[in-house]
């Protein structure tokens, strides 16, 4: 065992700091899972509503609004997985299957368009979002088993690596992103760059396990605030725009995924 003196010599936190970190991990794991489940329920409901009504608000990226049996299956699967998570029904296995399905979707559906047309930003954004959501599902699964089925660090990397793509886009398309920030918030361009740096810093912290707990916790808070400050007003202003609905659900899922990462940091790889 490593005693307190040895930990101090190595610059490690003392026992009080460890207790505070453990409390933060436990405090965010469950709400992260709930936020993630709500986002999946919204995705599934949106898909099924579009299939039933053929509404003028079809799902936006990363989903494809095609009225086929695959769309029915996708909507039902997402909604079923969400309900299982919300009502504690075999959550670990559901999260593993959902993460695997999302991961395969990236490999089969999103990667080929990127290979054909590398500079297309929409393809990169969709692939990064779905990959991070897959990592969030895997992180949820790791928090629900004494011996995780997937190494926690691998799950965290699957979530974190796509953040580099999102962060880079905040620099390359900074002026475009700045236009989405509400008028009452000053310094639009500053916030576009700030968020890009936040994505880079969070990804590095999670992957290197340096201040990973506060980094993932704060990242989840950023996404949740962005749902309330940015996405919800845009949805209310354009209720028949499916892209706005989907963007809000993605941000909500990313908030839950970030806090699921926080929870998974309590598990050893």
Image (cartoon, helix red, strand yellow):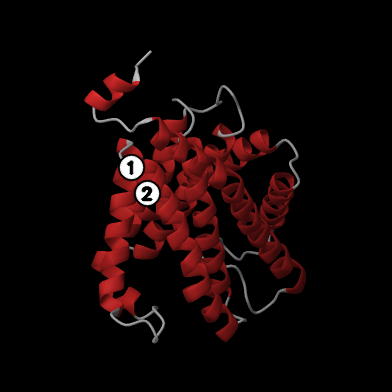
Residue at point 62%, 81% (across, down): 240
| 137 on left or right of 16 | right
Q: Position of residue 71 (x, y in %)?
A: 67, 57
Q: Position of residue 99 (x, y in %)?
A: 56, 41
Does residue 194 show up? Answer: yes
| 86 on left or right of 17 | right
Does residue 60 show up? Answer: no
Classed neighbour count for the residue bearing mark 1: other residues with Cα under 10 Å, few (<14), some (14–19), many (≥20)? few
**Where on the picture, by quarter, is residue 196?**
bottom left
| Contact (Cβ within 8 Å) of mark 1 with mark 2 | yes
Classed neighbour count for the residue bearing mark 2: other residues with Cα under 10 Å, few (<14), some (14–19), many (≥20)? many
Q: Position of residue 268 (x, y in %)?
A: 45, 25
| Camera-side residue of 16 and 184 | 16
**Is 9 rendered above or below residue 118?**
above
Residue matched to label 2? 215
| Camera-side residue of 177 and 111 | 177
**Is 153 rendered above or below residue 173?**
above
Give the alpha-carbon distance from disc 1 to disc 2, as whole Å. Answer: 6 Å
Residue matched to label 1? 211
Residue at point 61%, 27% (across, down): 145
Element under disc 2: helix
Residue at point 55%, 26% (across, down): 148
Residue at point 61%, 45% (across, down): 30
Indicate the quadrant containing the C terminus: top left, top right, bottom left or bottom right: top left
**Where on the picture, by quarter, is residue 14?**
top left
| 190 on left or right of 212 | left
**Is 31 rendered above or below residue 139?**
below
Indicate the quadrant containing the N terminus: top left, top right, bottom left or bottom right: top left
Q: Position of residue 187 (x, y in %)?
A: 28, 80
| Camera-side residue of 12 and 228 | 12
């Amino acid at each position: 065992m490593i005693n307190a003196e040895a930990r101090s010599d190595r610059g490690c936190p003392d026992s009080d700091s460890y207790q505070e970190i453990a409390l933060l991990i436990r405090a965010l794991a469950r709400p992260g899972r709930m936020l993630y489940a709500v986002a999946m329920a919204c995705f599934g409901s949106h898909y099924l509503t579009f299939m039933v009504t053929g509404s003028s608000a079809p799902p936006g990226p990363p989903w494809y609004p095609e009225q086929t049996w695959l769309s029915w299956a996708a909507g039902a699967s997402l909604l079923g997985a969400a309900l299982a998570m919300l009502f504690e029904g075999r959550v670990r296995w559901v999260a593993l299957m959902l993460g695997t399905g999302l991961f395969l979707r990236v490999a089969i559906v999103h990667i080929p368009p990127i290979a054909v047309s590398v500079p297309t930003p929409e393809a990169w954004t969709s692939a990064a979002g779905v990959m991070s959501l897959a990592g969030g599902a895997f992180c949820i699964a790791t928090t629900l088993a004494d011996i995780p089925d997937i190494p926690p660090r691998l799950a965290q990397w699957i979530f974190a690596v796509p953040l580099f793509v999102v962060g880079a886009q905040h620099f390359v398309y900074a002026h475009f992103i700045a236009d989405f920030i509400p008028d009452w918030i000053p310094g639009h361009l500053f916030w576009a760059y700030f968020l890009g740096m936040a994505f880079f810093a969070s990804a590095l912290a999670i992957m290197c396990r340096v201040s990973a707990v506060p980094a993932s916790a704060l990242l989840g808070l950023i996404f949740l605030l962005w749902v309330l400050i940015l996405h919800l007003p845009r949805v209310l202003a354009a209720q028949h725009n499916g892209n706005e609905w989907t963007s809000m659900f993605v941000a909500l899922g990313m908030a839950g995924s970030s806090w699921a990462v926080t929870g998974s940091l309590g598990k050893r790889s």
